[in-house]
Image (tube, grey):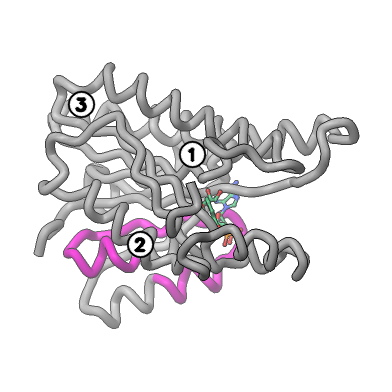
Amino acid sequence: MELKDRVALVTGASRGIGRAVAVELARAGARVAVNYAASEEAAREVVKAIEELGGQAIPVKFDVSDPEEVSRGIKEVEEALGGIEILVNNAGITRDGLLARMKEEDWERVLSVNLRGAFLVTRAVLPGMMKRRWGRIVNISSVVAFSGNPGQTNYAASKAGLVGFSRSLALEVARRGITVNVVAPGFIETDMTAALPEKAREALLSRVPMGRAGTPEEVAHAVVFLASEKASYITGTVLHVNGGLW
Ligand code: NAP
C-alpha cells in the first residue's frame, strides 16, 4: 500500500470531503487522525468506517482557528499515532452575503477558520516534518478562488489566500523533503452545497461542462495522489478537480 504506516491528520474530517479524504488515505495504508469541531458522533462513525476497512484511526476534537486547541490536538495525535507526516488542511466554512451588507463577524470567522486555521495547524505540524525531512501538506482551496463568486468575497479571499500561502511555504520547505500543494474542488455534493437554495444549485450545475456535481471521493483521490511518493517532484502547484468548470 502506497501510504503504509504514514501518519495523517485531516482537519474537518467528520463530514463531506474531509471524511472521504480520511477514508481514502486509510485505504492507502495511512493511520489517520480524524479532526472535527462539533460533530463528535460523525467523527466516531468515520473512525469506525476506517476500522472496518482494516485501518487505524482516532477522532480528535479541536477548532482549527484556536491556537491553544490546535497545539493540544496535535500533541494528542502525536502521542496516539506518532509524528504527523501528511497534513490535509480541509476544515472550511461559508458565511455568504453580498459585500455591501457583510458583517465584520462573517468576514472574520470565515478568514479565521479557512485561512488562519491552515496557518495554525501547519505551524504546529511543520517542525516534526522538518526534523524527519519528509512531509506532505495538501490545502483544500476552491474553484471560487480563481473564478470569483458573487456573495462569497470572504470565502473566495480565504481560498485565494490558501494558494499564496501554499506557494510561499512550498518554497520555504522544498529542501526539507516537504511538498505543499493545493487541491481546488469545484461543485462537490456535501452538506456545504446541500445548503444552497435549489435555484442556485441548478444554476451552478448548468455551468459545469461535465453536467454533474463531483463526489467527495473524486476530490479525495487527488489528495491521496499528492500525499503519495508518486507526487514526490510536485510542489507549490494547484490541482483542479471541477469537471471542467474552470
Ligand atoms: P462540510 O461538509 O460543510 O464539512 C466541513 C467540515 O469542516 C466538517 O467536518 C466540520 O466539522 C469541519 N469544520 C468546520 N469548522 C471547523 C473548525 N473551526 N475546526 C475544525 N473543523 C471544522 O464541507 P465540505 O463541503 O466537505 O468542504 C470541505 C472543504 O472543501 C472546505 O474547506 C470547503 O471550503 C472546500 N470546498 C468544498 C466545495 C464543495 O462544493 N463542497 C468546493 C470547493 C471547496 P464539524 O462537523 O465538527 O462541524
Q: In the image, 245: left or right of 155? A: left
Which residue is pictured at 53% across the width and 60% down the height?
A: 208
Circle 1 crowding by C-alpha within 10 Å: few under 14, some 14–19, many from 20: many
Pointer 2 or 3: first along the chain: 2
Q: Which mark is residue 61?
A: none
Q: Give the residue pinned by disc 2.
A: 22
Residue type beneath disc 2: Ala
Picture quadrant of residue 140? top left
Of badges 2 and 3, the one in the foreground is: 2
Q: Rate crowding at label 3 as few (under 14), some (14 to 19) or many (20 or more) other CA atoms within 10 Å.
A: some
Q: Nearer the viewer, residue 139 or 186?
A: 186
Q: Hey, what amino acid is under mark 1?
A: Val
> Do the numbered discs 1 and 2 sit on residues whose CB atoms are within 8 Å?
no
Residue 15 seen in the figure: no
Indicate the secondary structure of the residue bearing disc 3: helix
Q: Nearer the viewer, residue 241 or 169?
A: 241
Identified at 28% across, 51% down, the residue is: 8
Label located before the other in sequence (3 or 1): 1
Which segment is the magenta one? 23-46
Label 3: which residue?
A: 130
Element at label 2 = helix
* Badge 1 element: helix
Q: Position of residue 157 (x, y in %)?
A: 62, 31
Relative to 62, residue 38 above or below = below
Percent across and percent down for residue 212 are 51, 70
Distance (Cα) linking label 2 and label 3: 23 Å
